[in-house]
Amino acid sequence: MAEAATLSVDASLVLKRAQQGKSYWRRVWERLLDDKLTLAVTAMLMLLLIMVLFAPWFTVHDPYTGSVLRRLKPVGTLGHWLGTDEVGRDLWSRMVYGGRMSLLAGVVPVFLALLIGGFLGILAGYAGGLLNSAIMRLTDVLYAFPSILLAIAITGILGSGLKNTILALTISFIPPIIRISESVAAQTRHLDFVEAARASGARPLTIMRYHILNNVLGPILVYATSLISICIILAAGLSFLGLGVTPPSAEWGLMLNNLRQALWVSPLVAALPGVMIFITSMCFNLMSDGLRQAMDVRL
Amino acid sequence: MWAFTLRRLLYAVPVLLGVSMLVFALIHLAPGDVVDILVPPEVPKEIADGLRRRFRLDEPIYLQYLAWLSRLMVGDFGISFFTGRPVAEELFGALGNTLIIALPAALLGFSLGIVLGALAAYSRDSWLDKVFSATAIIGVSLPHYWVGIVLVAIFSVVLNMLPAQGMGFEGVPTSWTEIEHLILPVITLSLIPMGVTSRLVRANMLEILSQEFVGTLHAKGLAKRRVLYHTLKNAAPSALALMGLQFGYLLGGSILVETVFNWPGSGGLMNLAIFRRDVPVLSATILVLAAIFVVINILVDVLQALIDPRMRR
């Protein structure tokens, strides 16, 4: 889960790279193209995204209509190659359609947390002083909750549903992102080029947008990709508890919950939705590892 | 050292106050108040408002908060809406049950993680490293509640070797049949800490091994085992920080695993409280778990400072 971050910006290394001619992002891109594993998992995620977006093209059965006559058919049944669930709905259709909610609830909170946390972190790190104390002390309070506990508390109290799930997960992920961006921003703040920009009369907002953001972006992006993998597991976990997406929506965690009672009848079918959560989460983890290496970021 | 510890302890006070405010605010953000939960909607409004006055819900919000806080200070967590028993009694029993699986899980996960991570770093790029690193990444990507289900499917449904659900005893397990109930939940809970710890330890060790002092130690003719000791000592502080965080996540995240195994722990209690809308139990559970997390973090900071004097700033 959220790892305590220690980061350092090595000025001489940055200088050396700059003198080599190619821009930082171009070099990152070249390194990524050399990394077969990262390319493979990115391709898999793209495929998943396409399948989920164009779900009707990849499925035959409607994910919401079931039949009492076709309940809990095993994997490999004719016409339902992954079997059917506890009310006779095609499992493959539900897995594909379920990806919509799962991916949405896995990506959107991280993206929102990135925007809000990144902004607050850069602001705190660059401004220093009182503003820094105010933001960071508030972060400490949120940090006192393990992220899953905070998410459960929020959805548990405000009620289930996709909107509250996204809200809860966004709030849980803001504190670690603030911490990371604050620590990088605070380190960059005294580097020469920032001082130079300040001396040349650039306004604080401009400095933050151009100079600080560029340095914070790498570490934060790497961290956010790994957060997506956690977020997918947690979002599905909330639905699994009955706190996330509500029935009859197809969502991987909710399917896992509904199929739990079927575990004794048809263990393989009951375990299948979890495979999707696992694969997606692992792809994001591997992608984060690849990005980290390509961007040469230490988290 | 004492000054550092004291400073950390003092800093916990405002954090805990903030935590209590947040929990209080969350509960008051929820649609409807306590009376709406307790009495059926057909009760006349006058009676409901009478109850509101009795529970002092008509007072300004900050007075309500202060009253709640002062009761918390003396350890009064209120009475459960659902069972009518003191919340403290229910909560601490449940916390004990959670610790029975969380402690062994943490021990298993951390020790396996350290060993796997250190071995992987020491045999960098060999097949051993690849296998261990793959294990670690699988460990951090697995939804642990699903692993619980799969383990139950294998060991309870198919092989019929281990119990699928429940605790089967009270207090501390004393016999093998009672310990059997622990096996699946403990393995399930230990996966994430194992994966996260081994990834961090591996990365840390690799970085430390590339530092100059390690070369010096080798050059001085120190045995490999002694060099390992030095590296481990340098890798310890950040690993400790991570393990503290992970233990907190373990306690908070056990709600999912406890649901899978029907384990009567703090997570199970919280889950019940949410669906029964048992506000006193819910707020107390959140608060106490967060407080434990804060205390763990202080302990970790102090331990870190003990190992690495540079941290005592």
Image (spheres, rainbow, N blue to C red):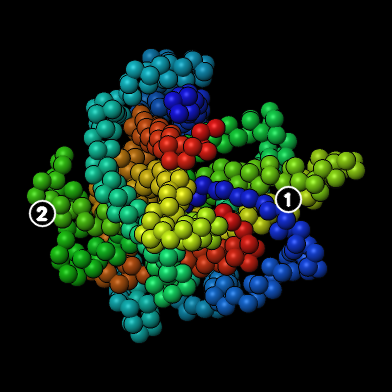
Q: Which residue in the structure is indicated by mark 1?
A: A213
Q: Look at the image and tell me whether residue A248 can be seen.
A: no
B139 shown above or below B304: below
Task: State the residue at coordinates (15%, 64%).
Answer: B161
* Residue hosting label 2: B177
Q: Secondary structure at mark 1?
A: helix
Label 1 neighbour load within 10 Å: few <14, some 14-19, many 20+: many
Left or right of residue B231, residue A195 in this image = right
Quadrant where the image shows the C terminus of chain A: bottom right
Q: Amino acid at mark 1?
A: Leu
Q: Nearer the viewer, residue B24 or B234?
A: B234
Q: Residue at x 65, y 42 (%)?
A: A182
Residue B261, visible in the rendered structure: yes
**Residue type of the residue flagged with mark 2:** Thr
Q: Picture coordinates of residue B177 (x, y %)?
A: 10, 54
In the image, is residue A65 above or below residue B60? below
Left or right: A170 in relation to B285: right
Q: Nearer the viewer, mark 2 or mark 1?
A: 1
